[in-house]
Amino acid sequence: MSTLSVEMLAAAPAGPITSAGHAQLGIAVLVGIAVIVLLITRFKLHAFLSLTIGSLVLGAVAGAPLDKVIASFTAGLGATVAGVGVLIALGAILGKLLADSGGADQIVDTILAKAGPRSMPWAMVLIASVIGLPLFFEVGIVLLIPVVLLVAKRGNYSLMRIGIPALAGLSVMHGLVPPHPGPLVAIDAIGANLGVTLALGVLVAVPTAVIAGPLFSRVAARWVDIAPPEKLIPQRPSEDLERRPGFAATVATVLLPVVLMLAKALVDIVVDDPKDHVQRVTDVIGSPLIALLAAVLVGMFTLGRAAGFGRDRLAGTVEKSLVPIAGILLIVGAGGGFKQTLIDVGVGQMILDFSEDWSVSALLLAWLIAVGIRLATGSATVATISAAGLVAPLAADMSTTHSALLVLAVGAGSLFFSHVNDAGFWLVKEYFGMDVGQTIKTWSVMETIISVVGIGFVMLLSLVL
């Protein structure tokens, strides 16, 4: 689920970089994706190189000038790393502080003591949903990864049995429940009522998260049985620790960025005045960068100092945290570059053009449009913004309830089948140590379940409300 701000969309080229027709663009998309998958699976080429080559092939087949294809790819790579890379780095630092100080052990030991084998997946989906409410997917996953990996390792659980519920909780929040930024954009575009959308979003999100999380994780664990990647598992702290941070202080530190971002979202809803001083302050402290940076700085005291770390030990922890994520940053960035190339050659507009002739119900049409844009561009946010803008006129004659359901239909469609053009696909693949096929059988299928189950509940609600 790639983060793409409205500002980045506004900065995109005014028109496509090629004049290719729809048939040629469709072929270009298929060839580009096929090249990426083939290079990775058959020739074992690194995903960063495969995505780079696949982007160039896509542009060439679409008939775009090579210099513009390169510009699109580098712009997408740079924007993704700028928007997500720093957050991943800060999340890695916080995760390392959690691990080295013994804070992660404290959380894991408490979870293992309170939750049994049957209730563990349910505990993970609940924790992920709470943490993921105000966060973009990438921020939520870097906060949860240390806990997910340690719970799976210590409790001897299948990684999929623990990881899929956590991913489902994050993803459902991303698409269906305001004040998450994605649904808020659709609410604004369609003119829906926030309170009604929130209430209906929760009604849809709870059973959807249950089905795609704890229930599907049983199947995913049979399909893909892997151990947590050793290089990313937070190691037990050295035995020379003077003490271990308390559970309350550790949880408070992890939740600090969540609280700051949620405060920003709530103030934006209640105040809605860019000139208001309170809103301006929360806009700063609630931004993902500042919120995670604050958590890191606070963690140096509540985690590092609480465990008896000196300045040198803290500096060493920060330095060691950044080494394992170098490859992840490159792959996620290249995924963003491929996505931007798709957008700039006109694939997103092609989907919108096709949708104008579809004669289906407004809710299903909104879902199908979002699905098409999601499949073509890889971005849930692009799919949400584009689809919401296209179907907004349909809401003029709708009731308040059905306008809210239109927002949820767009959100559900924006989550459909994440694959190789989604930076989130590569983030999950690398963090969980899976190959492309395993990621498709678990993460991609989970996303599809969320999307299909979500629109199913939306359509059911439309019949009774």
Image (cartoon, rainbow, N blue to C red):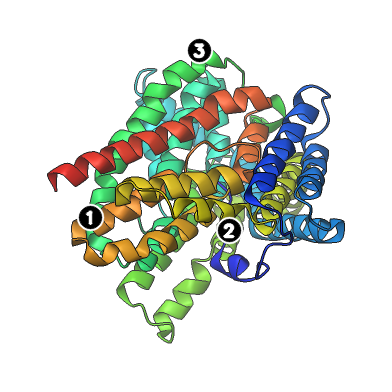
Q: Residues within 10 Å of mark 2 (few under 14, many from 20)?
A: many
- Say what secondary structure mark 3 lies in: helix
Mark 3, residue position: 222
- Quadrant of the image occupied by residue 185: bottom left
* Residue at image coords 35%, 48%: 359
- Residue 184 drawn at (x, y percent): 39, 62
Query: Which amino acid does the dot numbered 2 rest on?
Result: Leu
Judge left or right: residue 326 versus residue 438: right
* Residue at image coords 45%, 61%: 261
- In this rendering, which labeled residue sits more in front, label 1 or label 3? 1
Query: Which amino acid does the dot numbered 3 rest on?
Result: Arg
- Above or below residue 21? Residue 371 is above
- In this rendering, which labeled residue sits more in front, label 2 or label 3? 2
- Say what secondary structure mark 1 lies in: helix
- Residue 311 drawn at (x, y percent): 73, 55
Furthest residue in direction right, as rendered: 67
Judge left or right: residue 319 versus residue 407: right
Marked residue nearer the N-terminal end (1 or 3): 3
Whether residue 345 is visible, yes or no, is yes
Marked residue nearer the N-terminal end (2 or 3): 2
- Residue 68 drawn at (x, y percent): 81, 61
- Is the Cβ of the residue at disc 1 closer than 8 Å to that at disc 2? no
- Above or below residue 151? Residue 291 is below
* Residue at image coords 42%, 84%: 277
- Residue 88 drawn at (x, y percent): 65, 50
Give the Cα distance between marks 2 and 3. Answer: 34 Å
* Residue at image coords 72%, 30%: 37
Mark 2, residue position: 4
- Is the Cβ of the residue at disc 1 closer than 8 Å to that at disc 3? no
Mark 1, residue position: 402
